[in-house]
Image (cartoon, rainbow, N blue to C red):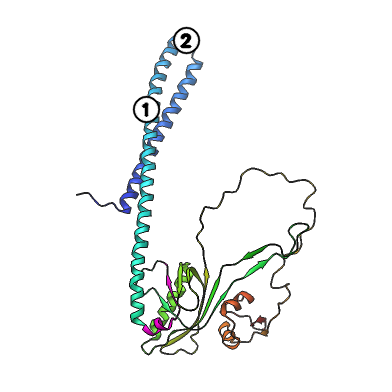
Amino acid sequence: MATKKTLKSYETQVTKAKTGYNKAKTTYDANNKKLGELKTQRAKAKTTSEKNTLDKKIKSATQSTKKAKGKVTKTKGTYNKAKSNLAAFKKSQAAERRKDALNTKKKIIAKMQKDKPGYWKAGRPFVIPKYPRSLSSYVYIDNTSESETVTTDLTTNSIAPGQYVNHYTQTSPVQHQIDGKLGGSLISKIKGLKEQFDSLKRWSTNGTEMELHHGQRSSNHSVLTSVAANFDAPRDNAVPVSVALEDVKWAKSEISKKSSKKTTTATGTNTGKKSATKGTRSNSKPKAGKYLTIKKGDTYWGYHVSFGTSIAKLRSWNGFPDKALPIGKKIRVK
């Protein structure tokens, strides 16, 4: 009965093949060097007897070098084949893991409908990894608000003569914002809800590809970019949360390598002075909106509750750390 191949066995084959190739190449390099030295001595030889002796040695060294070169070619082929087999095995393993994850996802969907039928029937939004690993890899959000944002940036300086200033645009990925709470049923426990929140944090930190379903809008490819919870007034069956997701797309091709060719620059160009960088928080003019002075105890969550502005927008507008809002500074809240 044939032994089942494992990742370790393929890696062992690669290591063994690489060792054989390196050994063959070392032997070839030594023989080739010796052959070169003999040819140098033959060129300097003066007597016929000395030349004949060196000719015999050169003939023998040439045969040894040729044989060593053939072994290098053979071992290199074995090494490349071993690497190819390892890559193919890893690819097949990844495909198997994805297949297992999709089967797990089907079981999760059935479990979700059984655990919280009310949430499922009401169409409460939930997030789930694209390729989940366990039956607990999902989080329901009892939402109070749900929004979707698309941001398009415009150029602020003309690119070329004859063009209007706002000529070029760059659109950011779609952003989903959901505010609400975890739990809410009589059987919900704060410990389990904190574990769900920890799952959200872990998926966000790891950049795990997620799916967002139910609710008003869905996304099959997204990443959690913001996860926040309020533990100021904990209840036994609910934890207020705010999450933000951003749609992602898979690249269809590798990034083109930068050309190594030198480019010539026409003389007389780029003679103007560089303008000061715009957009920094210290020198940019405040945008229209509602601003407040930060007081002790103020938090993004508090502003979110008071003014209805999502935590993700508060972060993007102000750029202050969540746990260290600078007292006395101005902050935009709406």
Disc 2, disc 1: CB below 8 Å? no
Residue located beneath label 1 in the image:
67
Q: Residue at x 40, y 75 (%)?
A: 138
Describe the element under mark 1 as helix, strand or loop: helix
Residue located beneath label 2 in the image:
47
At label 2, counting other C-alpha atoms closer than 10 Å, the crowd grade (few under 14, some 14-19, many 20 or more) is few
Observer able to see residue 135: no
Query: Seen in the image, is 327 located left or right of residue 66?
Result: right
Residue 124 drawn at (x, y percent): 44, 81
Q: Quadrant of residue 321?
A: bottom right
In this view, the residue in front, 246 or 4, is 246
| Upstream in sequence: badge 2 or badge 1 | 2
At label 1, counting other C-alpha atoms closer than 10 Å, the crowd grade (few under 14, some 14-19, many 20 or more) is few
Label 2 – label 1 distance at C-alpha:
30 Å
Q: How many marks?
A: 2
Q: What numbered label is drawn on residue 234?
A: none
Residue 95 drawn at (x, y percent): 37, 58
